[in-house]
Image (cartoon, rainbow, N blue to C red):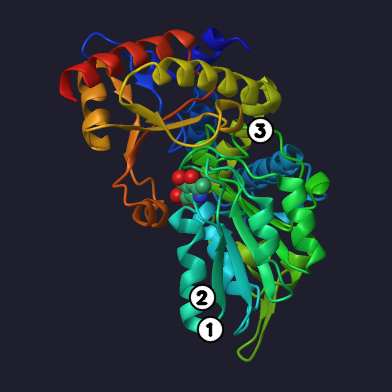
Amino acid sequence: MDVDRIRNDFPCLQQSINGRVPIYFDSACTTLRPVQVIDAMNEYYTKYPSCGGRSVHKFGTEVTIRCDDSRDKIQKLLNAEMPEEIVFVKNTTEGINLVANSLGFEKGDVVLGGDKEHNSNLVPWQVLSDRIGSKYDMIESDEDGSFSMENMKEKMSDKVKMVSIAQVSNLDGSTVPAKDLIEESHDHGSLVLFDSAQAVPHMKIDVQDLDIDFLCFSLHKMCGPSGMGVLYGKYDLLDKLDTFLVGGSSVADTTYEDYKILKPPQKFEAGLQNFSGIIGSGAAVDYLMDIGMEEVHEHEKKMNTIATKELSSIPGVRILGPEPEKRGGILAFLVDGMEPHDVAMILDEVANIMIRSGMHCNNSWFNAHGINGSSRASFYIYNTEEEVHIFKEELEKIVGEFR
Ligand SMILES: Cc1ncc(COP(=O)(O)O)c(C=O)c1O
């Protein structure tokens, strides 16, 4: 992978702040955007800033074609059976909420998650429980943070209607054994939803091969626009889902007395869409597929392996989760005697190194473990070994001085 060439595509890496180029290690939160995506979005506003799917003039037709193109590209990225299985939503959170609110859960139904779910894949199920009397339960991880198939098997029963779990954890990068987990769920008659916010941007995903029922992700974590996400669902399941948000574009016809809802995906895409976002999403998918998702994954693993080795040599630094090969591009750590926010602020202040700190929307896990947060570095296609070395040197100095 030609990281130098890739870096040239990212305008914000061309600037210097206080004499230093920023080192961006916060891609698990949001990635940087390449010029190809920014240009595609600008082109919508400068050349054909109109309404797709409705207006039949030249501008409108251009928007319709480009939005259809983007859906096709995402279908290809996931190897979905048909483009109609790709629903545009605003983010992962909305995709999960859509399924939680539309699948027709009933009192007594059990939804299973992991013990490290992002609030976006926890609260919708907790609220559902409060509202209708379904039950939320969780599968505890192994000691080192890895997914435990044994613990899952203990929790499975014919009451479980949905296993909704992060494919890759944003807390420590640990990754579930996707195929085994799906097979085990299906054997018990349960559906599976993958919160793939930290998976789709980082690895090759084949939804048909996995036989996954629903999968959600956000484009802002994969070089795409903010405010764009995708809900993938098997067509038959999407067809059976209730509508959640309705109005213009989601109906074939109405009378004063009645309405006729369209088929998926239009059934879920009510109201005027984020056209520049949809077009930018297609550009982001093109950008990543040109690099190759296997290459992306290998590069992140390499960065993480080097960073883990380097940080492990700093006294007082403790890394969360299993070995680096199992953590994708995520390296979460604690520094004895230092607050995570202090670590992040000092790194930013002294060296323009941008990491994340806090509970990363995984409050439930941190509260259960009595820890008030962690520091998290996360790597992506534009990060270099040299940046990792600088990170280690600067962190070592900070730990030596402030701990
Ligand atoms: C695992 C996971 N799930 C869900 C989300 C929520 O994503 P969004 O805020 O784009 O909906 C995130 C974001 O950090 C995440 O890491």
* Dot 1 beta carbon under 8 Å from ligand 1: no
As measured in the structure, the alpha-carbon distance from the residue carrying label 2 to the one carrying label 3 is 31 Å
- Residue drawn at x 56%, y 23% is 300
As measured in the structure, the alpha-carbon distance from the residue carrying label 1 to the one carrying label 3 is 36 Å
* Dot 2 beta carbon under 8 Å from ligand 1: no
Q: Nearer the viewer, residue 25 or 95?
A: 25
Residue 61 x %, y %: 67, 46
Q: Secondary structure at mark 1?
A: helix
Q: Secondary structure at mark 3?
A: loop
Question: Label 1: few (<14), some or many (≥20) within 10 Å?
Answer: few
**Residue 132: assigned label:** 1
- Residue drawn at x 22%, y 33% is 338
Image side of residue 336 versus residue 8, left or right: left
Do the numbered discs 2 and 1 sit on residues whose CB atoms are within 8 Å? yes
Tell me the amino acid under the disc marked 3. Met
Quadrant hosting residue 183:
bottom right
- Residue drawn at x 66%, y 58% is 152
Q: Nearer the viewer, residue 140 or 363?
A: 140
Image side of residue 130 versus residue 112, left or right: left
Query: Label 3 belongs to which residue?
Result: 203
- Residue drawn at x 41%, y 26% is 25
Do the numbered discs 2 and 3 sit on residues whose CB atoms are within 8 Å? no
Q: Nearer the viewer, residue 164 or 373?
A: 373
Residue 8 x %, y %: 49, 12
**Residue 128: assigned label:** 2
Q: How many marks?
A: 3
Residue 67 x %, y %: 65, 45
> Which of the image's four quarters has the C terminus?
top left
Tell me the amino acid under the disc marked 2. Leu
Residue 280 x %, y %: 55, 37
Residue 121 appears in view: yes
As measured in the structure, the alpha-carbon distance from the residue carrying label 2 to the one carrying label 1 is 6 Å
